[in-house]
């Protein structure tokens, strides 16, 4: 089996016994043994190696992100996971911790992850930074690229874009 993402393909090589990748036009061995599981994102590969260590391979560089992680989710340009009940995000070869809230009902697009905060509003992880969008209760929301649309009431809508809220 194999998995493909943007500019990468990951596979356990049956001939050499290695975990390998096709990365931007080159075939490379990532690990000396097969990976237990793997998933590709946008120009990176998340995998669990033979010793059950969780790792990310990106542009010929490997980074360990932890052991015994839960709810690992590979989406676009980030890996979202729980480490001892704390939500963390791998983004561009760094691991970030989401503070003071239990992340639930999240959506990811590109370098943005929006989620319902403890007040029923929306917070977001935007390219390495945590941002509180609103504490006002949101009926529903959706992430579209760099934009978050929120339905606040029957005929009230907000759009968060470029750090600002626009009300309609």
Image (cartoon, rainbow, N blue to C red):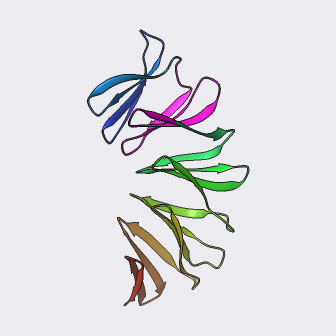
Residue 50 lies in the magenta stretch: yes
Measuring from the top left, give residue 5's x and y in whole percent: 35, 40
Which residue in the rendered view is the most extreme toward the top?
15
| Quadrant (top left/top right/bottom left/bottom right) for the N terminus | top left
Measuring from the top left, give residue 127's x and y in whole percent: 45, 61
Question: On screen, 155 above or below 21?
Answer: below
Please tell me in which quadrant of the rendered image residue 136 appears.
bottom right
Give the number of marks: 0
Please tell me in which quadrant of the rendered image residue 108 appears.
bottom left
Which residue in the rendered view is the most extreme toward the left?
25
| Quadrant (top left/top right/bottom left/bottom right) for the C terminus | bottom left
Residue at the image point whose x is 42% and y is 51% from the top: 77
Which residues lie in the magenta part?
34-62
Question: On screen, 159 above or below 12?
Answer: below
Measuring from the top left, give residue 3's x and y in whole percent: 40, 33
Question: On screen, 58 above or below 2?
Answer: below
Question: On screen, 2 above or below 73?
Answer: above
Residue 44 lies in the magenta stretch: yes
The answer to whether residue 39 is left or right of residue 123 is: left
Residue at the image point whose x is 41% and y is 67% from the top: 143
Residue at the image point whose x is 49% and y is 75% from the top: 140
Q: Nearer the viewer, residue 67 or 73?
A: 67
Residue at the image point whose x is 61% and y is 73% from the top: 117
The answer to whether residue 85 is left or right of residue 34 is: right
Measuring from the top left, give residue 150's x and y in whole percent: 45, 79
């Amino acid at each position: 089996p194999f998995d493909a993402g943007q500019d990468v393909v990951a596979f356990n090589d049956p001939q050499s016994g290695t975990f390998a990748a096709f990365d931007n036009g080159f075939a490379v061995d990532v690990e000396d043994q097969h990976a237990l599981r793997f998933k590709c994102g946008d120009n990176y590969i998340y995998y669990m190696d033979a010793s059950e260590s969780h790792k990310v391979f990106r542009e010929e560089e490997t980074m360990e992100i932890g052991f015994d992680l839960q709810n690992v989710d590979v989406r676009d340009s980030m890996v979202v996971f729980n480490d001892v009940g704390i939500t963390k995000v791998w983004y561009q070869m760094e691991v970030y911790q989401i503070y003071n809230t239990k992340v639930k009902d999240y959506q990811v697009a590109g370098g943005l992850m929006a989620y319902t905060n403890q007040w029923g509003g929306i917070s977001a992880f935007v390219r390495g930074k945590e941002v509180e969008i609103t504490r006002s209760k949101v009926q529903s929301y959706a992430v579209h690229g760099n934009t978050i649309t929120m339905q606040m009431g029957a005929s009230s809508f907000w759009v968060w874009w470029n750090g600002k809220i626009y009300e309609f």
